[in-house]
């Protein structure tokens, strides 16, 4: 679920952002690190980047000959979110189809719960489609569902994870 990682990235500061005062330079490096961090979104190994927790070290800058920009090696710790097979999580239903529902869990937007993996639930079509069980519990839009992850897939083009999940097991289903 959550991973604390220590990373080493190169932060590029354009020549026009350089200042003789060290404090402004440090601020520029931190701001650029945070911009790069948020733009990266996710990686296959670490999952989704959530937050920079600590800035460990800013190394000595090296000037690029062609542009005059300065590259600083930066060590920092961060918090990431990645889903794993077998993990039990909760997600919110955002789309209902005849064959199942799509859920969101944290930064993961594409989680599919197949109707075949919802024991005892039947699809009810209509203006507000839903799945309903014999015990009259409903799975409809904006309902929170506890599920077990069957499998995950990394989609490089979108830099995101997709997951297939199940409600087969004890204490799984609408919360």
Image (cartoon, rainbow, N blue to C red):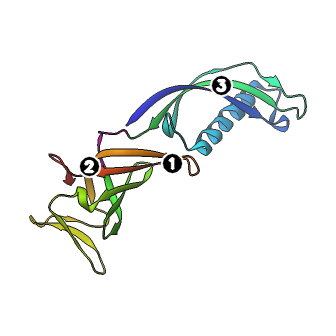
Instruction: Give the magenta part as a residue range.
Output: 84-90
- Mark 1 to mark 3: distance in Å? 25 Å
The residue pinned by badge 3 equals 74
Of labels 3 and 2, earlier in sequence is 3
Is residue 35 inside the magenta stretch? no
* Vertical relation: 8 (above or below) 109: above
Q: Residue at x 83, y 32 (%)?
A: 69
Rendered image: mark on residue 160 = 1
Q: Are marks 1 and 3 in contact (CB under 8 Å)?
A: no
Q: Residue furthest right?
A: 66
Q: Quadrant of the C terminus?
A: bottom left
Q: Quadrant of the N terminus?
A: top left
Rendered image: mark on residue 147 = 2
Relative side of 168 to 50, left or right: left
Residue 126 percent coordinates (x, y): 28, 80
Q: Residue at x 65, y 25 (%)?
A: 74
- Mark 2 to mark 1: distance in Å? 20 Å
Relative side of 128 to 135, left or right: right
Of labels 2 and 1, earlier in sequence is 2
Is residue 88 inside the magenta stretch? yes
Q: Nearer the viewer, mark 3 or mark 2?
A: 2
């Amino acid at each position: 679920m959550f991973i604390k990682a220590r990373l080493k990235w190169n932060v590029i500061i354009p020549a026009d952002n350089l200042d003789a005062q060290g404090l402004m330079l440090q601020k520029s490096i931190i701001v650029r690190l945070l911009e790069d961090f948020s733009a990266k979104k996710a990686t296959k190994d670490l999952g989704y980047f959530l937050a920079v927790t600590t800035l460990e070290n800013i190394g000595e800058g090296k000037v690029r000959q062609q542009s005059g920009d300065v590259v600083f090696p930066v060590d920092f710790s961060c918090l990431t979110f990645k889903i794993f097979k077998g993990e039990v999580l909760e997600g919110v239903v955002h789309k209902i189809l005849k064959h199942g529902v799509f859920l969101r869990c944290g930064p993961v937007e594409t989680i599919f719960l197949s109707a075949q993996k919802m024991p005892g639930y039947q699809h009810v079509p209509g203006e507000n489609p839903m799945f309903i069980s014999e015990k009259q519990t409903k799975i409809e839009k904006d309902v929170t569902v506890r599920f077990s992850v069957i499998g995950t897939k990394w989609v490089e083009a979108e830099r995101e994870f997709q997951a297939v999940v199940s409600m087969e097991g004890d204490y799984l289903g609408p919360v």
